Amino acid sequence: DKEAYRHTLKANGFLTRDAREVERKKPGQPGARRRFQFSKR
């Protein structure tokens, strides 16, 4: 029966969409978090 199967999936978290998205690339940076290489001199 589909109901029991669906309950099993829900219990294991297979029915909720993972809403995480890629962080946007910021201007003046090579990536989203990565800064340009730091040089002391």
Image (cartoon, rainbow, N blue to C red):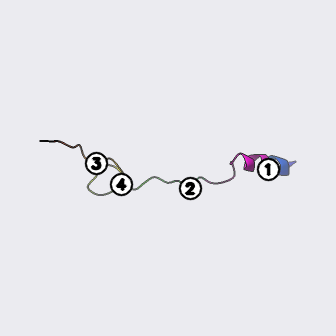
Q: Is residue 34 left or right of residue 12?
A: left
Task: Identify residue for label 2.
Answer: 19
Task: Identify residue for label 1.
Answer: 7
Residue at x 49%, y 54% (from the top left corner): 21
Task: Identify residue for label 4.
Answer: 25
The amino acid type of the residue labelled 4 equals Lys
Q: Secondary structure at mark 1?
A: helix
- Give the total number of marks visible in the rendering: 4
Q: Is residue 20 left or right of residue 27?
A: right
Whether pointer 3 and pointer 4 mark residues with C-beta atoms closer than 8 Å, the reply is no
Cα separation, mark 4 vs mark 2, equals: 18 Å
Which is more N-terminal, label 4 or label 3? 4
| Crowd rating for badge 2 (residues with CA inside 10 Å; few <14, some 14–19, many 20+) | few
Task: Identify residue for label 3.
Answer: 35
Quadrant where the image shows the C terminus: top left
Query: Residue 39 falls in which quadrant of the image?
Result: top left
Whether pointer 4 and pointer 1 mark residues with C-beta atoms closer than 8 Å, the reply is no
Q: Secondary structure at mark 4?
A: loop
Image height check: is 37 above or below 29? above
Which region is colored magenta? 7-17
The amino acid type of the residue labelled 2 equals Ala
Which is more N-terminal, label 1 or label 2? 1
Cα separation, mark 3 vs mark 4, equals: 11 Å
Residue at x 84%, y 52% (from the top left corner): 3
